[in-house]
Image (tube, grey):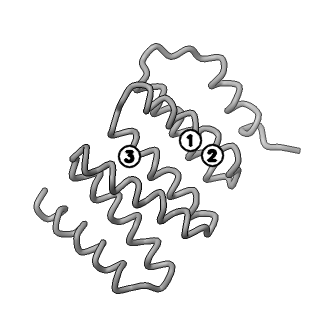
Amino acid sequence: MKPLFCWILPMVLLKVEINNQFVAVDLLTLYGQAFKNILKYDLSNQYYEKMCLASSSIDDYYHLVMCKLNYADLAYQQANYAKALKFGFEALELTKKYVYPPQYVKVLIAVGEVYEELSQYDIAAEYFFKALAIRNDLG
């Protein structure tokens, strides 16, 4: 028998009409993260896809970067490190168009964690030190 959580969550999203696209994108992200946390990767991926489509339709670079980070994290959780790096690098490319230092730090740390998992500590350290330098500049 499936937990009640698995039945209610998808139905709630279908019945709620949200007028603010930014709130909808954040809600889709939360649903994707919730399903990732209970190891329902296929459902998590579905919500991340919806989130990414919604982000691109409103031309919101912050959420487009988060889209790539969500996919990278999902791949990382499934030990698909090549895919996690692919999405991490796509997020890095997007941060060149949209400069928001706290988010850039998140991207650097995510890429560094993948390299750390692959035992490529020197490369991981480069990303971590870049993130640390930016974080220190922010205060």
Of helix, strand and loop, which one carries label 1?
Answer: helix
Where does label 1 land, which residue?
Answer: 48
Where does label 3 land, which residue?
Answer: 65
Counting residues from the N terminus, which is met first, the one under dot 1 or under dot 3?
Answer: 1
Can you give x and y, in whole percent of width and height, for residue 81 in the image? 55, 70
In this rendering, the answer to whether 25 lies above or below 106 is above
Of helix, strand and loop, which one carries label 3?
Answer: helix
Nearer to me, 95 or 4: 95
Please state which amino acid type lies under the numbered disc 3: Val
Can you give x and y, in whole percent of width and height, for residue 53 in the image? 51, 32
Counting residues from the N terminus, which is met first, the one under dot 3 or under dot 2?
Answer: 2
Of helix, strand and loop, which one carries label 2?
Answer: helix
Where does label 2 land, which residue?
Answer: 45
Res 139 visible? no
Find the distance from the CA under tag 1 to the CA under tag 3. Answer: 12 Å
Image point (74%, 39%), residue name: 6
Please state which amino acid type lies under the numbered disc 1: Tyr
- Give the side of residue 44 with respect to residue 19, left or right: right
Image point (56%, 46%), residue name: 33
Is label 1 in contact with label 2 (beta carbons under 8 Å)?
A: yes
